[in-house]
Image: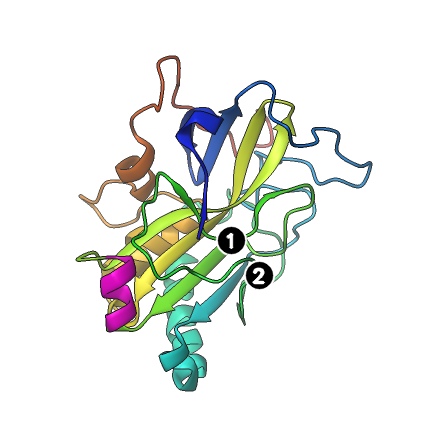
């Protein structure tokens, strides 16, 4: 679980599955992207120009590897529920069917308490983001007690794309979830829906992003929503 200091991020804003972060001036990372670098695309919930379909990856705890196929089936059922979202077409996920693939890139999930505002679960900052819009880590109860505490599920950024010299955009989102919670209706209606860039479907549930990023890290932050309407 890669950590980043809040001092490295001047502010964070949430917008339909997107987090933009202004980076402190003088960051030693190279800010000059190669010519084939991906572009940030706010007109699609896929968020980057190099993605043509909604793809999710799933990584299970070692003790759940024997149940990997069944876990993927259960996630597929939840994703079919999400595909009934009224904004699914407007999100422009592409003409291909969504897929869920075994194995997620990036560092292994650390066996330590997840702090969503301070953790990246995935590759981190990338010049060319990977194919996965959403990373899902499914944990057995013992591991979940360490990573999640009393929570059933939580989210964190998985991958950022550099928009310009001082701005990073979250383009992949990670969910960390107890295996026993996968079939709960709230997982699909709230958490999985939010992790692919849509608003929670279940009435009365606050948006998952609002739970995590509703307050600015520093003064001057703002809340912004991208338009998925091609006319804007």
**Left or right, 204 with reference to 26:** left
Q: Would you say residue 6 is visible in this rendering?
A: yes
Where's residue 160, x and y in %?
56, 40
Q: Judge by depth and name the residue closer to the eye, 223 or 139.
A: 139
Q: Which mark is residue 122?
A: 1
Magenta residues (range): 142-148
Q: Judge by depth and name the residue closer to the eye, 65 or 76.
A: 65
Q: Is residue 50 magenta?
A: no
Q: Is residue 67 above or below residue 138?
A: below
Where's residue 96, x and y in %?
62, 61
Report the predominant secondary structure element of the magenta stretch. helix
Could you classify mark 2 by the number of other residues whose Cα lies within 10 Å: few (under 14), some (14-19), or many (20 or more)? some
Q: Is residue 146 magenta?
A: yes
Q: Which mark is residue 145?
A: none
Where's residue 186, x and y in %?
24, 58
| Residue matched to label 2 | 105
Counting residues from the start of the chain, the first of labels 2 and 1 encountered is: 2
**Left or right, 67 with reference to 141:** right
Q: Disc 2 vs disc 1: Cβ atoms closer than 8 Å? A: yes
Where's residue 28, x and y in %?
64, 28
Q: Judge by depth and name the residue closer to the eye, 157 or 107.
A: 107
The residue furthest top is 220
In the picture, residue 183 is in which quadrant? Answer: bottom left
Q: Secondary structure at mark 1?
A: loop
Residue at 43 percent of width and 33 percent of height: 5
Residue at 80 percent of width and 41 percent of height: 36
């Amino acid at each position: 679980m890669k950590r980043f200091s809040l001092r490295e991020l001047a502010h964070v804003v949430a917008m339909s599955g997107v987090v933009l972060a202004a980076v402190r001036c003088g960051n030693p990372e190279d800010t000059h992207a190669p010519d084939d670098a991906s572009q940030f695309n706010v007109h699609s919930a896929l968020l980057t120009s190099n993605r043509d379909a909604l793809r999710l990856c799933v990584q299970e705890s070692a003790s759940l590897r024997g149940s990997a196929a069944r876990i993927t089936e259960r996630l597929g059922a939840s994703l079919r529920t999400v595909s009934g979202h009224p904004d699914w077409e407007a999100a422009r996920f592409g003409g291909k069917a969504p897929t869920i693939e075994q194995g997620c890139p990036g560092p292994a999930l650390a066996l330590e308490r997840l702090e969503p505002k301070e953790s990246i679960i995935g590759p981190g900052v990338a010049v060319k983001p990977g194919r996965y819009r959403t990373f899902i880590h499914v944990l057995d109860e013992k591991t979940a007690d360490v990573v999640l505490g009393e929570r059933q599920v939580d989210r964190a950024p998985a991958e950022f794309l550099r928009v310009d010299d001082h701005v990073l955009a979250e383009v992949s989102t990670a969910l960390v979830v107890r295996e026993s919670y996968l079939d709960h209706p709230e997982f699909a209606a709230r958490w999985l829906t939010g992790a692919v860039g849509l608003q929670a479907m279940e009435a009365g549930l606050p948006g998952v992003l609002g739970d995590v990023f509703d307050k600015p890290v520093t003064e001057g932050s703002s809340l912004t929503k991208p338009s998925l309407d091609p006319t804007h």
